Amino acid sequence: MWRAVASTALTVLVVVLFCIAGVVLWGKRQYNGPGPLEAPICLKVERGASMNRLSRQLEAQGAVRSAHIYRLGTEYAGISARLKAGSFLVPAGASMAEIAEIVTRDGRSTCGTEVNFRIGVLNAEVQVREIDPATGQYREVIAFDPSGEVPGAYEDIAASPDTRFRVTLAEGVTSWQVVEELKAAAFLEGEVEQVPDEGGLAPDSYEVRPGVGRAALLDEMQARQVTVLEKAWAARAEGLPLKTPEEALVLASIIEKETGIPEERRRVASVFVNRLRQGMRLQTDPTVIYGITKGQGALGRGLRQSELRRATPWNTYVIEGLPPTPIANPGGASVAAALNPEDTDFLFFVADGTGGHVFAKTLDEHNANVRRWRQIEADRNAN
């Protein structure tokens, strides 16, 4: 009798385990399989929201078939506590696993209305954009100079709790420019007691909450630049005439101001590295300009011969080696170029009339290139 009971119990246990395995397999297929969304949506995750709450929201929006399976799937994957606040574009047919990855990845919002306070080399601009979930493309709604009149429509957009705010630094801006322009960002608060060291701010895009302090944002920019420099320094080429990461940052800032063409950065870097190796002066105009302006605005005119000869700590026509500080805030690509230049014999370069530069190994070649550039300038001025 007991043998029969045991056999029956074992049979029931096997059936139960088989059913459980079937349910688990079915749940995995539901979690990883295509979702029910027929069109993309913009999913807003509130600050402080839980994955349990989000699962119900997703079910209500028709993005998942079962809130219970979604929640269990994120717990099984060990990501239920990684939920980020923001507005996220969820594509049509996204699986539960794909949605979970979207809302736990990095917290960068990818849809909704966004105010981007962009600080450029010459001026700042406020750009209000909206993303169309159907196409994934941004549409510009408003753009204006923050130092001028603010459009009335902007006030309503800025006051909406659903609007996201972003501050973007262009490559090559100076620290003084950043601080001055941030004063016009009305969604930020607080004073800045001291302009950060030149070169110490990372040109990048920073999503911010309204009311965040300007000083706190600058601290984040500095921390990000430290990380950029540390990684690039660790991966630097051997034998460079750069003794410290700080010297690399100085060279990167010069590269940043000399070319806006990504493909040229490492070649421009090679020219300056070759000059440093041979003990030649760098003779780069942007350093002369910085010695005049100290990074406080654009020069707004060409350099005079007297200025090229005037001694300042930054005038590389006069001083030997690198200037004492960076002359702008270089982006990560220019930092990488300074520490991994092309292997060339070039010692000179000059504008070629197309926005780029032509490079030369000898002074005779360079002088010929300069004559061609001056003829291009003369022809343009004549037209």
Image (tube, rainbow, N blue to C red):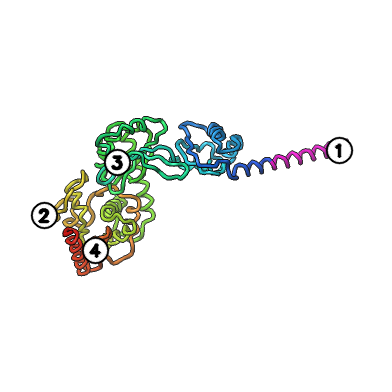
Which residue is located at x 35 percent, y 45 percent? 204
SS at mark 3 in the image: strand
Magenta span contains residue 18: yes
Which residue is nearer to you in this view: 181 or 12?
A: 181
Tell me where residue 72 appears, x and y as whole percent: 60, 37
Tell me where residue 307 appears, x and y as whole percent: 13, 53
Residue sitting farthest toward the left = 306
SS at mark 1 in the image: helix
Which residue is nearer to you in this view: 85 or 213?
A: 85
Going by the numbered disc 3, the residue's amino acid type is: Glu
Going by the numbered disc 4, the residue's amino acid type is: Phe
Left or right? Give the position of 242 relative to 107. Answer: left
Camera-near label (4 vs 3) is: 3
Residue 379: name its quadrant.
bottom left
Mark 4 to mark 2: distance in Å?
22 Å
Question: Residue tagged by mark 3?
Answer: 125
Q: Residues within 10 Å of mark 3 (few under 14, many from 20)?
A: some
Which residue is nearer to you in this view: 158 or 172?
A: 158
Task: Say whether marks 4 and 2 touch (CB < 8 Å).
Answer: no
Camera-near label (1 vs 2) is: 2
Query: What are the residue bounds of the magenta stretch?
Result: 1-22
Question: Residue tagged by mark 1?
Answer: 4
In primary-sequence order, the first of circles 1 and 2 is: 1
SS at mark 4 in the image: strand
What label does residue 348 carry, if any? 4
In primary-sequence order, the first of circles 4 and 3 is: 3
Tell me where residue 237 appears, x and y as whole percent: 36, 59
Position of the N terminus, as image quadrant, is: top right
In primary-sequence order, the first of circles 2 and 3 is: 3
In primary-sequence order, the first of circles 4 and 2 is: 2
- Reply above or below: 277 against 146: below
Tell me where residue 14 appears, x and y as whole percent: 76, 41
